[in-house]
Image (tube, grey):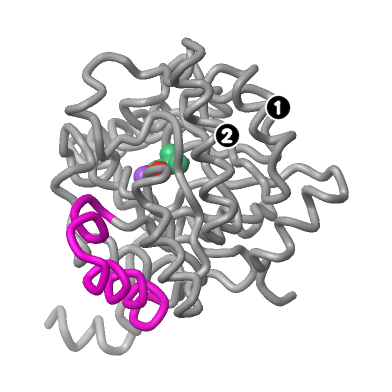
Amino acid sequence: ASRVTPGDLTRLKADGKRIVALTAYDRPTAMVCEAAGVDVILVGDSLGNVLLGYETTLPVTMDDMLHHVRAVARSTHQALVVADLPFLSYQADQAEALRNAGRFLKEGGAQAVKLEGGSRSAETIERMVTAGIPVMGHLGYTPQSAHVFGRNVVQGRDVDVATTLVHDALVLEEAGCFAIVLECVPHEVARAISERLRIPTIGIGAGNGCDGQILVFHDAVGWGPGANLKFVKRYANVGDILRQAVSDYAREVREGVFPAAEHSFSMSAEARVLFEQ
Ligand code: KIV
Ligand code: NA
């Protein structure tokens, strides 16, 4: 099967079918997503928190991202691979933004990029789309602005911010985005945006009225610090399974139980005779 394209996502929305997206940062997680038929794999800058141990996504670099985008692109052939532009890779300068986005396609093997922000990002998005780079938008709670938001995670509970979100979503569609992530937005606002747009919305903490859903892989399988967030549903307890496996391994090594005979190699009978003389 050939890869899902941005146009396929618009068709899914038009046909009333929901889009399935997850993050993946490496080969094993990407292969699990592909085997399950996930439409969109996002190599999110959330890898800064999930894999690299940062408190926010702000320290993540282009090189960090490229390292993981390549691994995911090499390991997949069906899903649309979207690469997340990290903090300061697209905000400072238009030419730099275009080159960084292009690197994700040219060197990373991704098929699209994602960046945060509404009207402030519209010109940047237009330039990328003009250059042939499909762009996914991201509105609502945008983690690269964590220090601006502070503890105000949900965006659009009041009419002013809700109205701005609707306006920004229309601006992003007009700028050429093929889809928009809505993060931590009241379900009423996310549904209204989804109904106004031709392009699909992909929700995370944005209720059931979006055209698709995304979660951080590790949160969805119960393997990481975010698994207890309100908007996460934990579909497995992979962390518990891994902790059990590693403590069994440690015990068996300490007790001399592992490796058993079946995990060991033998010499030939003739060689053994000569060797033991
Ligand atoms: O980095 C990320 O994982 C994201 C998704 C949560 C949308 O941006
Ligand atoms: Na992100």
27 or 124, nearer to the observer:
124
Residue bearing mark 1:
209
Question: Residue 187's quadrant in the figure?
Answer: top right
Three-letter amino acid code at disc 1? Gly
**Gap between marks 1 and 2, in whole Å?**
8 Å
Residue 112 image offset from top left, x and y in percent = 49, 66
Start and end of the magenta stretch?
Answer: 86-108
The answer to whether residue 23 is above or below residue 54 is: below
- In the image, 120: left or right of 9? left
Q: Position of residue 11 (x, y in %)?
A: 80, 58
Residue at which label 2 appears: 203
Q: Could you say where residue 89 lies in the image, as x and y percent from the top left?
A: 22, 60
Question: Residues at badges 1 and 2 in contact (C-beta under 8 Å)?
Answer: yes
Circle 2 — which element? strand
Give the residue type that dot 2 points to.
Gly
Q: Is residue 235 above or below residue 172?
A: above
Which quadrant does ligand 2 occupy?
A: top left
Residue at image point 26% right, 60% down: 90
